[in-house]
Amino acid sequence: MGALAVGTRAGLRGRDHELARLDQALADARAGVSAVLVLRGEPGIGKTALLEYVAAHAAGFRTTGVMGVESEMALPYASLHQLCAPLLGNLPLLPEPQRDALSAALGLRQGPTPNRFLVGLAALSLLTRAAEERPLACLVDDVQCFDEESLQAIAFVARRLTAEPIAMIFTLRSPGGDELTDLPGMTLGGLNDTDARALLASAVPVALDPRISDRIVAEAHGNPMALLLLPRLFSPADLAGLWPPGRRPVTDTIEGAFHLRFQQLPPDSRRLLLTAAADPTADADLLWRAAERQHIPAGAAAPAEAAGLVEFDHTVRFQHPLARSAIYQKAPAPDRRAAHQALAEATDQHTDPDRKAWHRAQAAARPDENLAATLEDCAVRAQGRGGAAAAAAFLRRSAQLTPDPARRADRALAAALAGIDSGGLSHAHDMLAAAAAGPPDETRQARLDRLRARLAFTQRRGTDAPRLLLDAARRLAPVDALLARDTLLEAYGAALYAGRLHTGPDRPEIARAVRSAPQAPAPPRSVDVLLGALTDLTLDGYPAAADRLRQALHTVQREQRSATPGADQRWMWLACPVTPEPLAPELWDDEAWHELATGAVTLARDAGALGVLPMALSYEACYRIHAGDLATAASLSEEAAAISTAIGSAPMVYASLLLAAWQGRESQALRLIDAARTEALTRGEGRALSIADYSTAVLYNGLGRYDAALAAATQACQYEDLGLLGWALLELIEAATRSGQPRAAAAALDRLTERTQAAATPWALGVEARSRALMSTGDEADGHYRQSIKHLSRCRITVDLARARLLYGEWLRRRQRRGQSREQLRSAHEALSRIGADAFAERARNELLATGETVRKRDTSAISELTGQEAQIARLAREGRTNLEIAAHLFISPRTVEWHLSKVFTKLGITSRRQLRAAFSSSAPPLSTM
């Protein structure tokens, strides 16, 4: 990893706390408990030295590691390949789907685009296999330089390590983006003055003039590398004049020190080091082949090593990433091009065509159409391996090398689109600016407007995107009618999110524009079917549009089933992620919702579409909440938030609001809701306000504060938000009937019935019957409640079934039908408690108490004490699944499954899987009649 020449121990002065954490991580792994730790800090602060400490003290461990190297182009899974390379002897032992996925990702075999989940799971299995013989230490250095695909896969592994004898230690440069915020970590600060002076003294064989010593300590700001390097690289005279007046970043100081030492080397050594710095693979054989082509003698290595800048072995290791960066970035452009040209000539066309093309591109001094076209081919191959970020990098350079201005602008648009899809939003912005500089062209300008709007939507989801997209569609209509219709669909989706805060075109205006746009082709494409259905819904009403909406939903399902990353069929989530989302809940189709929600995440992951993935994760989380799987919903929501933060897009808060509301945690929920309102008003995202109102209504109905629930639900129903209005009407009807507002309830029931009768699914008919029962009396109410439970028992929406039983139980108790009420309330209480809908569960408990039963709150041995993952594993084991099957289902290792089950058994007081069914069936708090 490029150790400091002064040795590891000297660089660790003042790091007792950090060393203790690392020692504990190794001790945990030796004991069979996984340890993950992320070390953050500025360059030179000592992160790599701490990794070297781990390597030196991992007695009895097998060690594998990978160091990130800065590069404008990182081939997909390159860093994962480095980490896994020493362990590939275990590859044949993996299950075939995992083996095939990992082999394809690492370029070991040809095959279809690998499923990213399977790649991550395969990497986890590979590491777990290696750790069966002895503990494994994974040292992951400079993760900010990894290719996006490797980072996702390795982070996937780290998040699932639990009961494996594996210690995984990351280092991450800060400040900067951080995709590992959810993992345990610590930030390294500078050394205090005493430790800094002691470290400086240890690096200098003779006493320094106190003024020079004071200057070094002051300018180093406690940075160990600066303290160690400066007195070794400069004379006292140099040091006295090294810094101009005023403070400069420590990073600049260190880079300057490295570059000065580089400039003092002989010319051949400088050329050798520049060639090494231009190659991110650190392949010594490749370097020497490139050196031969530049007539650099083998003796050029010795001065570079003696200067402490680099070590040559079977790999090339720079003392520090800043040394490599300083050498490469400060080199004259002709020298960099010469280095890349030599590397291109030395790279084998058959085994590594993409890297060869990249070096050729970096060596190019002028535009070259043949080379630009070659880079387009490289982008296609990268996309086929799931490398969206690499594809975007190839396309950017392809655009830059295109001689024809019009074609260059078109390629810049393609690069911008790839950047948006991969989450490279700053690069996308630059490519859009390059496209705008092209010669005038109406079609290109319309496409440019379209992508600008998509970028604005991804970053802010505000009110400007609908106008931009509608204008682009109108510009496109005369020259590209099909793309115009695609853009109208995107405009509709953007207006959906602007919602009640729209300042430009709203959904009705866009729907009217659709009807005046060029007609759909015959036969219509999927996008045309969806656009027509949404237009009918907006202008003609729900009953008239229901059949066409169903047709559109079925079309979306067929498209998603047939989609593969890179194929045109993935448009519904990559090109237009917002409009298919509400279709299934709008039609009360829980089966379709389940299929689309889980499939959307898979598509986005496989395509590496980080710009879309947070939305897909949030979509699935919302489904999981309604299906009663709040633990999985929480995990998905956290991942969506982490990715949004990492790529700089607007956060997806919908699922987190719903989750807090259903959990009934008032202070937490209101804090999230208030923050979401503020953010939504700032951005102009009206849909988020409606979600906040709906969540507030759910929260207060659960808490039994019906006046507050009625106020929130009324607000949520003011604007007809697609896929949300029906839910809000349910809350309004319950709150209104309990608040003595029958007129409001009746009006809401009429609006609800218009939708549920047209949908006619078990979910729709079930919630309509439940709502109608609230408005009825006597036998009529009883019949509606029974019908509600019958219908809802046939669908996946567990929360609505549990609430139907709760309302029926409450109604039965008030009619003195205690035995029947207890039956319903017990079922409701058990389900709501198991789900984690605590406020509604407490309502059921209070009703049971009123029937004369004592209901003990769950103690520490009850199901509620299980973590979300423990509960998932226990339920799967109860269904008869093996550890291997559970591991594959949850993307964890079999050892982790075994570890979690042992904790489940302890908490539930059981000793075998056979007892799980009884434990779960009796997991509701014990009941006793008073």
Image: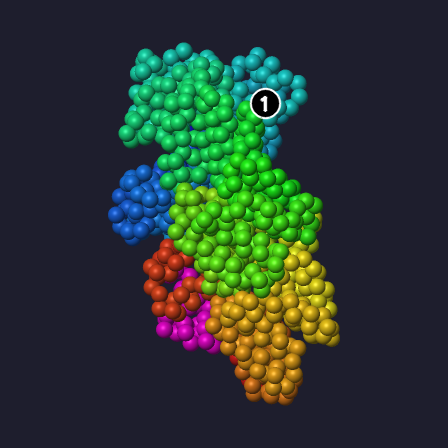
User: Which is nearer the eye, 225 or 630?
Assistant: 630
Q: Residue at x 67, y 54 (%)?
A: 689
* Image quadrant occupied by the C terminus: bottom right
Residue type, label 1: Ile
Q: Which residue is mark 1?
A: 216
Please say whether residue 562 is one of the residues in the magenta stretch: no
User: Which is nearer the eye, 390 or 900?
Assistant: 390
For this view, does 665 lie left or right of residue 261? right
Q: Which span of residues is magenta-colored?
A: 896-925
Q: Find residue 338 and report its image quarter.
A: top left
Q: Position of residue 633 (x, y in %)?
A: 52, 58
Say how the picture is coloured: rainbow
Q: Residue at x 46, y 34 (%)?
A: 392
Mark 1: secondary structure: helix
Q: Residue at x 54, y 44 (%)?
A: 518
Q: Position of residue 579 (x, y in %)?
A: 54, 51
Q: Is residue 497 visible?
A: no
Packing grade of label 1 (10 A; few <14, some 14-19, many >=20) is many
Q: What secondary structure do most residues of the magenta stretch adopt?
A: helix
For this view, does 245 lie left or right of residue 22? right
Q: Find residue 475 and report its image quarter.
A: top right
* Residue 671 drawn above or below residue 214: below
